[in-house]
Image: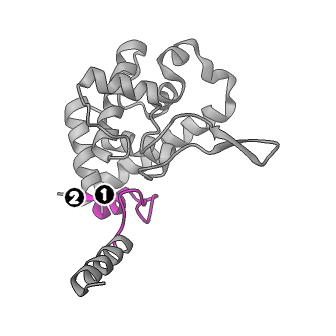
Amino acid sequence: MKKPLRAMIIALLLSSCGGSSSTTPPRDLDNACTILQQRPDYYRAFKKTERKWGIPIHVQMATIHQESKFVGDARTPFRYVLGVIPMGRQSSAFGYGQALDGTWDEYVVAERKRGARRDRIDDATDFMGWYKNISRERNGIALTDARNQYLAYHEGHSGYRRGSYNAKPWLIGVAGRVETRAAMYEQQIAACRLR
């Protein structure tokens, strides 16, 4: 093997091992300031979505924390038959916001975003802004209401309107935790020094 080719292969291998990937979550998920300082691209995406759609940064962050723990390529777990035979994933949810294939496709068409990807933070937050605004229009949920916005995000607009979450005490608990985390993030962000 020639030296330049060998050197190029070694350089490529080393560069693929170093640094943090966009799919790796920030270190301290309980500190909004740390998250935003570690990932300035997150902060830019959250601000852009806040300006465009009116969704506060802390509501976006609490939803993403619940859905993917800030892992860009997050997927739902596999289902198994007899505990060992994989039968596919629990749903098509993928990415930061765990958007389902069908809902993502609606967003791509409605917003004319053919190149959008669920594993890119700016696309994921824009999707979230789009979806939560529909929740506000159809169900009257304030954009600042992290709890009910999360319930509508999880159950869908029609499911929320029917109150399907009332039969899921575990989901009501999760929505309460999203609300608590959003309030925590809001207080932290108010004290952050961000550009």
Residue that appears at 59% across and 39% down:
174
Q: Main secondary structure of the magenta part?
A: loop
Looking at the image, residue 151 lies above or below residue 140: below
Labels 1 and 2 touching (C-beta < 8 A): yes
Q: Which residue is mark 1?
A: 36
Q: Residue furthest front?
A: 1
Question: Residue 102: x, y in percent?
Answer: 45, 24
Label ID, residue 54: none
Which label lies toward us, 1 or 2? 1
Looking at the image, residue 32 lies above or below residue 130: below
The structure residue drawn at horizontal position 37% and vertical position 26%, both measured from the top left corner, is 105
Q: Residues within 10 Å of mark 2 (few under 14, many from 20)?
A: few
**Which element is circle 2 on?**
loop
- Where is residue 34? Give x, y as percent: 35, 63
Badge 2 amino acid: Leu
Please state, as top left, top right, bottom left or bottom right, where the N terminus lies in the image: bottom left
Q: Which residue is mark 2?
A: 194
Q: Nearer the viewer, residue 27 or 17?
A: 17
- Tell me which segment is drawn in magenta: 19-40
Q: To which quarter of the image does residue 85 belong?
A: top right
